Every structure is written in structure tokens, then in C-alpha cells.
């Protein structure tokens, strides 16, 4: 029985994690749940655990004063104490945004395995995170569907056999929208994703392909790949999640329906492989199609490759500037096409190839956010 703590239990990934654990009650026990500010949903998730016999989790509300005064973990340092005090075997980090770096480091510092949905942790601090995991003897198990696919393929073939990878992208809500009308795109339109159902920020990032950009950076750090080793293809049906290209010239793919419960389960159960519970063995193979990315439609993907080539400071700036720009777009303070312009402006500074240690990472993040906010004001 594996003991699981879920950070970001009230979000899209967190809820799907509880759902898949419900289908594998004999394998897992939920020992901790956190949310940031949605106390009602946190308490509802806790009740679901009790009702379904999943466990009696400790609770943490990391970003708001709780109404329920019996909630023992609340406030600024609560998440670190919460993870530190827990006897969980594995922490699922499904927090949104750069704020996910804190629970990532907290889990690894205690030597706990980490099922990592929060790609921002790896984009901002990949080297620090992986070095820490190694030092503590803990595993980093990717949850992002493309990286879960790559992780499983690379484990099977061995890293030395792999010459390059292809990650797929649905193309998001604006795949077929006329280019000249993108400047008028609204948040509601960008939130209408054709195949995946996800949290708001990542859905906007799917429309711009900043999500794929973050995933290129994530794949590079997780699997030690160079920019030229990673290709992105548009695959509207979202059935193939990634390919590896082996040295002898073959491509191997992982296919499944677009359902995050599967990569969540794979990460939580690793190295065991559990009997499938949600995977439809016929993911729908008719009419699968692949095409190259039009970089004029998705400038944020090109910028991610630039950031990868430039180094760690640029990767941090890319993520930070994009988070600020997406928040401004959602608030009606920046047009859709301004998101890429703001990120580009923030990458034009002299940024260090290596950023050593957490304080320098957080400082680079803060600096890029300040620059992004200035660029957003100028844009208006
Ligand atoms: P959601 O916005 O749906 O949920 C985010 C969760 O994080 C909520 O539980 C929220 O709590 C919590 N949270 C918000 N801010 C903070 C903070 N500052 N500190 C700690 N916790 C916080 O996001 P998703 O579930 O869509 O995404 C989560 C992560 O997983 C992201 O990094 C995303 O890129 C990644 N991911 C998501 C996929 C998906 O299908 N959704 C696919 C692949 C990766 P509250 O409810 O209280 O606000
Ligand atoms: Mg993904």
C-alpha cells in the first residue's frame, strides 16, 4: 500500500488523481491533500476520501486563512511543514505555476518520490531538482503525458539507444483560426480546448503553444536532450503522446486516449505496472494525422527553443514572463498576440546560461516578472 500526498488536490490533475486512486483502492492510501485557497473544495476532497475509503488525509490550505480552525496546516510555510511532517511515500505535485517549485523541493528534501505534474519546477530549476533527487535517492516521475510516454519508452530502450524524441501537440483552440484574427481572440475562445480538459492557465498555454514550449524545456532537462534532439509535431487527435527515435533509425510511440488519469497512475505506481482500469485498448486509430508546426501561428514555441539554446536564465524568464502575460490576457489587460511579444521582450535581456542555487533562481524569476509587467504596461 503506497501512501500518497497530493499538492493541488482541488485542481484538474488533483481531482483526476483521486479518481484514479478510487479505482485502485488496494494499492494506495491518501495521507495528505493541499489546496491554495479553495477551502470548500479541499474539504469536499477530504470527504470523498472518507466516503470512498481512500484514507483520512491531513489537510493543508497554503494560501488563505481557513474558516475551519481545526485545519492544522495553513499560511505561508504550511506546505513545507505539511510535506515534512507527512509519512507519505510519494508526493504528487499538481500545483499550478512557479509556486510548485517549493513543494517539489520540499518532497525531495525529505527523500520522498515525486510524481511531477508541475512542469514549471523542471523548467525553472531542472538541474537543482534532479541533483537533489539523486542526492536524496528519490525518484522524479513525470506526469505530463508526453514526458510520461518518453519516460516509459526511454526506460524500456535505455537512454543510450535514444537519438532524439518527438513530442506531439494538439494545436489548441486556434489551430484552424485565420492568423489575422488572432489579435482579437478572447480568453473564453482560448479556453475552448479541442481534445484535453485541463486547468485554465495550461489551456491558454495550449492555444499559444507556450505549453509545448515549456514541455520542450522540460524534456530537455528531464532526459538530457539538446534543442536539435527534440521535435514537435501537430497531432490533432492527441492519441500518440510522444515518439522516441532510436539510433538505428526506428520510431517508437506511446498511444492512449487523451486522459490524464493514465500518466498519473503510471507515475504513482512506478516501478510497478498496474492492471489497466481506464485505458481503452482501442484508443481510436483511424485517421491519425501529423503535421509540422507553423511557427508564425505559434511564436511562443520558437521562443522556447531560443530559450533552451540560451540556457537556464532564459528558461526561467520564459516561464515567468509567460505566466505574467497570460494573467494579463485573462484579465483583459493584454491582447492574445501580446503574450508572445511580452515573452520575447523579456528574452532580449542578457540572461545567464547557468543559474546556481534556489536564491538565484527565485531572483531571476522575480526580475523577469518585473520586466514582463513593464512590457505589459507599454503594450497597453
Ligand atoms: P488547476 O488550475 O486546475 O489546479 C491548480 C491546483 O494548484 C489547485 O489545487 C490550486 O488550489 C493549487 N494552487 C494554485 N496556486 C497554488 C500555489 N501558489 N501554491 C500551491 N498550490 C497552488 O491546474 P492543473 O491541474 O491544470 O495543472 C496543475 C499542474 O499540472 C500545472 O503545472 C500544469 O502545467 C500541469 N499539467 C496539467 C495537465 C492537465 O491536464 N490539467 C496536464 C499536464 C500537466 P486552489 O484550488 O485552492 O486554487
Ligand atoms: Mg503535456
Image (cartoon, rainbow, N blue to C red):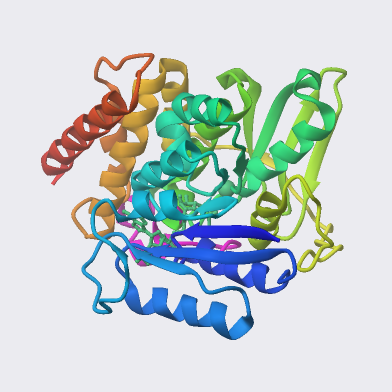
Residue 9 in picture, x, y percent from top left: 47, 65
Residue 208 in picture, x, y percent from top left: 43, 46
On screen, 108 above or below 33? above
On screen, 35 above or below 132? below
Residue segment shown in magenta: 181-202
Indicate which quadrant contains ligand 1: bottom left
Q: Residue at x 86, y 63 (%)?
A: 282
Residue 108 in picture, x, y percent from top left: 50, 38
Q: Is residue 361 left or right of residue 232?
A: left
On screen, 51 above or below 90? below
On screen, 378 above or below 268? above
The answer to whether any part of residue 298 appears in the image is no
The residue lying toward the viewer, choosing from 154 and 35, is 35
The residue lying toward the viewer, choosing from 148 and 112, is 112
Q: Residue at x 46, y 37 (%)?
A: 109
Say whether residue 5 is magenta. Answer: no
Q: Residue at x 30, y 59 (%)?
A: 62
The answer to whether any part of residue 74 appears in the image is yes
Q: Residue at x 36, y 49 (%)?
A: 80
Which image quarter: residue 4? Answer: bottom right
Q: Residue furthest bottom?
A: 51
Q: Is residue 74 left or right of residue 191?
A: left
**The N terminus, quarter of image:** bottom right
The residue lying toward the viewer, choosing from 360 and 324, is 360
Count the numbered circles shown. 0
Say whether residue 183 is magenta. Answer: yes
Residue 360 in picture, x, y percent from top left: 27, 24
Amino acid at each position: 500500500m503506497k501512501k500518497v500526498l497530493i499538492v493541488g488536490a482541488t485542481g484538474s490533475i488533483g481531482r483526476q488523481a483521486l479518481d484514479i486512486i478510487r479505482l485502485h483502492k488496494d494499492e494506495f492510501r491518501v495521507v495528505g491533500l493541499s489546496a491554495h485557497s479553495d477551502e470548500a473544495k479541499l474539504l469536499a476532497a477530504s470527504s470523498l476520501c472518507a466516503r470512498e475509503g481512500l484514507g483520512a488525509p491531513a489537510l493543508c490550505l497554503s494560501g488563505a486563512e481557513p474558516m475551519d480552525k481545526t485545519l492544522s496546516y495553513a499560511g505561508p510555510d504550511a506546505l513545507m511543514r505539511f510535506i515534512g511532517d507527512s509519512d507519505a511515500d510519494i508526493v504528487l505535485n499538481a500545483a499550478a505555476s512557479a509556486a510548485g517549485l517549493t513543494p517539489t523541493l520540499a518532497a525531495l528534501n525529505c527523500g520522498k518520490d515525486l510524481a511531477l505534474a508541475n512542469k514549471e519546477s523542471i523548467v525553472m530549476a531542472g538541474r537543482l531538482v534532479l541533483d537533489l533527487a539523486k542526492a536524496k535517492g528519490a525518484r522524479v516521475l513525470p506526469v505530463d503525458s508526453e514526458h510520461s510516454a518518453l519516460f516509459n519508452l526511454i526506460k524500456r530502450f535505455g537512454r543510450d539507444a535514444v537519438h532524439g524524441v518527438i513530442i506531439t501537440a494538439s494545436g489548441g483552440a486556434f489551430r484552424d483560426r485565420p492568423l489575422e484574427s488572432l489579435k482579437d481572440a478572447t480568453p473564453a475562445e482560448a479556453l475552448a480546448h479541442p481534445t484535453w480538459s485541463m486547468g485554465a492557465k495550461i489551456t491558454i498555454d495550449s492555444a499559444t503553444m507556450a505549453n509545448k514550449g515549456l514541455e520542450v524545456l522540460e524534456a530537455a532537462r528531464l532526459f538530457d536532450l539538446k534543442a536539435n534532439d527534440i521535435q514537435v509535431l501537430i497531432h490533432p487527435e492527441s492519441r500518440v503522446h510522444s515518439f522516441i527515435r532510436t539510433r538505428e533509425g526506428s520510431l517508437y510511440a506511446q498511444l492512449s486516449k487523451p486522459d490524464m488519469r493514465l500518466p498519473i497512475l503510471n507515475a504513482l505506481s512506478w516501478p510497478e505496472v498496474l492492471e489497466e482500469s481506464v485505458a481503452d485498448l482501442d484508443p481510436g486509430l483511424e485517421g491519425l494525422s501529423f503535421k509540422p508546426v507553423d511557427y508564425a501561428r505559434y511564436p511562443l514555441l520558437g521562443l522556447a527553443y531560443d530559450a533552451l539554446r540560451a540556457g537556464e536564465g532564459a528558461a526561467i524568464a520564459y516561464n515567468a514572463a509567460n505566466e505574467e502575460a497570460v494573467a494579463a490576457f485573462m484579465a483583459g489587460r493584454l491582447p492574445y498576440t501580446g503574450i508572445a511579444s511580452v515573452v520575447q521582450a523579456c528574452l532580449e535581456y542578457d540572461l545567464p546560461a547557468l543559474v546556481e542555487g534556489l536564491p538565484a533562481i527565485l531572483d531571476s524569476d522575480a526580475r523577469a516578472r518585473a520586466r514582463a509587467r513593464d512590457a505589459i504596461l507599454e503594450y497597453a
